[in-house]
Image (cartoon, coloured by chain):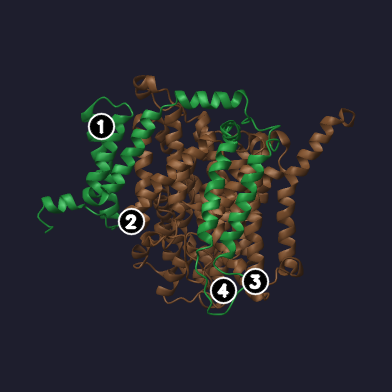
């Protein structure tokens, strides 16, 4: 560990962390260029560096891009990466209410806390966690995906349970478009552009950025174009960055809880930051007091802090299988695995023994990356948030252009652009009909993995669903999922009972 | 019959459910056409299993929402009452002109993308978008659009080394295309 400290704190490597975080934040803010693209773009730069510096630069880029993704999710409701979707649920309404600066500050503090807690857990538990992550089977992963889906409970306020379930099912249905795990084409109708299915970015940009931008225009008065054009957007207030002591206190426990959950979910290969952020959001909503629950989805501090802490902690956790087993837990760590291999380093149980400098310097740089992100981004927040002060007549077309461009940069296919406009128009209709769009995205993200793991679990268990109750790990996760879904219903039942029997109070 | 249909879609929740019901039925129909891989014989979980399960669950949920008016009505503001009236009133007063114009502009942009390319297509889209949303000065709209797309083009092609299609039109103009 001392070797790691010495390596990470050399002037060159500290500069690399700064450079990585800055470049990552900038790239991550552009829709379509998430952590995966950011790291891929940095690979040629790292060739000229020694392995430790190269990995430190990439780790910095990773954290920066994750934070950058959250920034665009908060400011313009355009989560360019799936891990930032849950951040937009409360981040964007908060920015809309004139607290953009505060929302970005909470995101920065929560990310820092999540990353710090996860780095401590990583240092303490690496060998133990590697064994646990190996013991997870398909049935456990399937149960995890179901557990992730229970985050829809968070959107079940005001009689929306059935609507949220329907939208989740719609997302799951959209996820079946394209080639299935056995190689059979489904719902492609002979259109070759659909063979790979719909992309997450397409759906995310269409349902969030595009639909939201159009919805805002729809609400503006048609007869008042000039006044509208002259003024900045109504939500242009950046507001103070200050987070009060009581707010910190309110968020401390949820952030700690979400960081721990996020880290352990991140350790599981394939689970990753997205499920972690959804789980944390759903869990914190369920655990919040009734008054705090009402705030979720409207700009709740906890609703923003929990997924941010969880996705950052999960990003750190995803390094466990990479560094200890050589298994990339996510697309991002897969690219990093490629980079390590190009240096002639084979990650796995021997990495710790053969390349202690690389192993520990990457772990130390993760913590350093979090500190640098905080130092770098807090002063930049007022400038970043100024984007909201742009007049609406400029901001809306720019958001639409960036969303379209983001999708194009991933697929380089104009069919995706046409599809995106159509999905955006349909999403606008559902937005008008008061159907929540977040569960749609949740179902879409989890759909592929859920089917894949269910199929494998059934293969292992000879087509029997008995794994749900006979395998203890699966059964425990399933029970937690059921509990998570039933908790809000039980709460409302108890509340209704109390209302009907005033004497109980 | 017409009255019954009208009452079925007299609130926005049920209208949405009706749309989802139609989609789920079409999806179920298409699910039955999905091929099954018989290499390993008849499997308990095949390519149709998940889609059919999802379609059936969606149809069930949509029917519950459609046919059980009491579900969610106590707290859902979107019941056939004043809220729904306000919703339809709001729709009538909404800024449809700009939204439809922008949707058409986006579709035009996507269908002419290969022809106009990243730079010309992007700049034209932004220029028209600014004007549609109320910018009065053609000069300002053009400068902002060109500056923004130009910066993005430079950044993506020169700094990040990404390939961006310059478009058939520019190729013809520069004599690169037959």
Name the residue carrying label 3.
A458
Q: CA distance from mark 2 to mark 1?
A: 28 Å
Q: According to the colouring, which chain is brown?
A: A
> Does mark 2 fall on the same chain as mark 3?
yes
Name the residue carrying label 4.
A325
**Badge 4 local density, few (<14 within 10 Å), some, or many (20+)?**
many
Q: CA distance from mark 3 to mark 2?
A: 36 Å
**Badge 3 local density, few (<14 within 10 Å), some, or many (20+)?**
some
Tell me residue B53's x, y (percent).
61, 59
> Does mark 2 fall on the same chain as mark 4?
yes
Foreground: A470 or A170? A170
Q: Nearer the viewer, mark 4 or mark 3?
A: 3
Residue occupying the point 62% across, 47% down = A165
* Image colour assigned to chain B: green
Q: Earlier in the sequence, mark 4 or mark 3?
A: 4
Name the residue carrying label 2.
A413
Task: State the count of labels.
Answer: 4
Tell me residue A275's x, y (percent).
59, 55
Q: CA distance from mark 4 to mark 2?
A: 36 Å
Name the residue carrying label 1.
B141
Tell me residue B8's x, y (percent).
60, 35
Of all residues, the one furthest to the bottom in this rendering is B40
**Vertically, is A398 above or below A54?**
above
Q: Nearer the viewer, mark 3 or mark 2?
A: 3
Q: Earlier in the sequence, mark 3 or mark 2?
A: 2
Q: Nearer the viewer, mark 4 or mark 2?
A: 2
Q: Chain of mark 3?
A: A
Q: Chain of mark 4?
A: A
Left or right: A290, with A363 as reference point: right
């Amino acid at each position: 560990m001392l070797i790691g400290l010495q390596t990470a704190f050399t002037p060159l490597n500290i500069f690399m962390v700064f450079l990585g975080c800055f470049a990552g934040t900038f790239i991550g803010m552009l829709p379509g260029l998430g952590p995966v693209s950011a790291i891929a773009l940095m690979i040629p730069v790292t060739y000229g560096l020694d392995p430790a510096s190269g990995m430190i630069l990439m780790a910095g880029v990773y954290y920066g891009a994750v934070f950058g993704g959250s920034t665009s999710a908060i400011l313009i409701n355009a989560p360019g990466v799936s891990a930032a979707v849950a951040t937009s649920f409360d981040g964007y309404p908060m920015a809309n209410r004139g607290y953009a600066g505060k929302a970005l500050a909470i995101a920065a503090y929560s990310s820092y806390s999540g990353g710090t807690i996860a780095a401590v857990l990583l240092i303490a538990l690496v060998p133990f966690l590697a064994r646990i992550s190996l013991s997870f089977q398909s049935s456990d992963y399937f149960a995890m995906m179901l557990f992730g889906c229970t985050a829809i409970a968070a959107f079940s306020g005001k009689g929306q349970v059935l609507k949220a379930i329907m939208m989740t099912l719609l997302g799951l249905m959209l996820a079946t478009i394209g080639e299935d795990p056995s190689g059979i084409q489904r719902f492609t109708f002979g259109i070759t552009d659909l063979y790979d299915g719909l992309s997450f970015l397409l759906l995310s940009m269409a349902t969030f950025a595009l639909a939201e931008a159009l919805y805002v225009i729809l609400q503006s008065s048609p007869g008042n174009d000039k006044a509208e054009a002259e003024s900045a957007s109504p939500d242009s207030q950046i507001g103070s960055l200050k987070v009060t002591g009581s707010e910190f206190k309110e968020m401390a426990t949820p952030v700690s809880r979400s960081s721990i959950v996020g880290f352990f979910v991140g350790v599981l290969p394939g689970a990753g930051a997205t499920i972690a952020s959804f789980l944390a959001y759903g869990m914190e909503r369920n655990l919040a007091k009734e008054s705090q629950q009402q705030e979720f989805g409207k700009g709740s501090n906890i609703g923003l802090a929990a997924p941010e802490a969880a996705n950052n902690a999960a990003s750190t956790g995803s390094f466990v299988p990479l560094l200890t087993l050589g298994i990339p837990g996510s697309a991002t760590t897969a690219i990093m695995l490629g980079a390590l291999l190009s240096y002639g380093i084979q990650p796995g149980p021997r990495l710790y023994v053969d390349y202690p400098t690389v192993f520990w310097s990457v772990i130390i740089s993760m913590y350093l990356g979090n500190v640098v992100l905080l130092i770098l981004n807090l002063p930049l927040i007022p400038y970043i948030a100024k984007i909201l002060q742009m007049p609406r007549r400029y901001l809306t077309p720019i958001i639409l252009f960036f969303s379209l461009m983001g999708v194009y940069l991933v697929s380089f296919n104009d069919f995706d652009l046409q599809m995106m406009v159509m999905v955006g128009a349909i999403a606008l209709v559902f937005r008008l009909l008061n159907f929540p769009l977040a569960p749609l995205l949740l179902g879409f993200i989890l759909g592929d993995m859920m089917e894949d793991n269910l199929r494998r679990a059934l293969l292992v268990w000879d087509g029997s669903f008995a794994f749900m109750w006979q395998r203890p790990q699966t059964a425990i996760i399933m029970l937690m999922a059921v509990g998570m879904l039933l908790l809000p219903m039980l709460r409302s039942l108890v509340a209704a009972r109390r209302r009907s029997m005033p004497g109980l109070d | 019959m017409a009255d019954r249909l009208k009452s079925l879609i007299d609130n926005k929740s049920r209208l949405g459910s009706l749309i989802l019901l139609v989609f789920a039925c079409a999806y179920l129909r298409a699910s039955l056409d999905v091929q099954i891989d018989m290499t390993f014989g008849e499997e308990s979980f095949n390519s149709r299993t998940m889609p059919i399960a999802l379609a059936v669950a969606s149809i069930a949920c949509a029917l519950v929402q459609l046919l059980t008016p009491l579900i969610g009505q106590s707290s859902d503001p979107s019941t056939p009452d004043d809220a729904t009236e306000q919703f339809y009133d709001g729709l009538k007063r909404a800024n449809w002109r700009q939204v439809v114009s922008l949707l058409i502009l986006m579709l035009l942009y996507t269908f002419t993308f290969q022809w106009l390319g990243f730079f010309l297509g992007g700049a034209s889209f932004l220029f028209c978008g600014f004007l549609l949303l109320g910018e009065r000065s053609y000069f300002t709209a053009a400068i902002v659009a060109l500056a923004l797309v130009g910066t993005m083009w430079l950044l993506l092609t020169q700094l990040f080394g990404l390939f961006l299609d310059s478009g058939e039109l520019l190729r013809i103009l520069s004599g690169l295309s037959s």
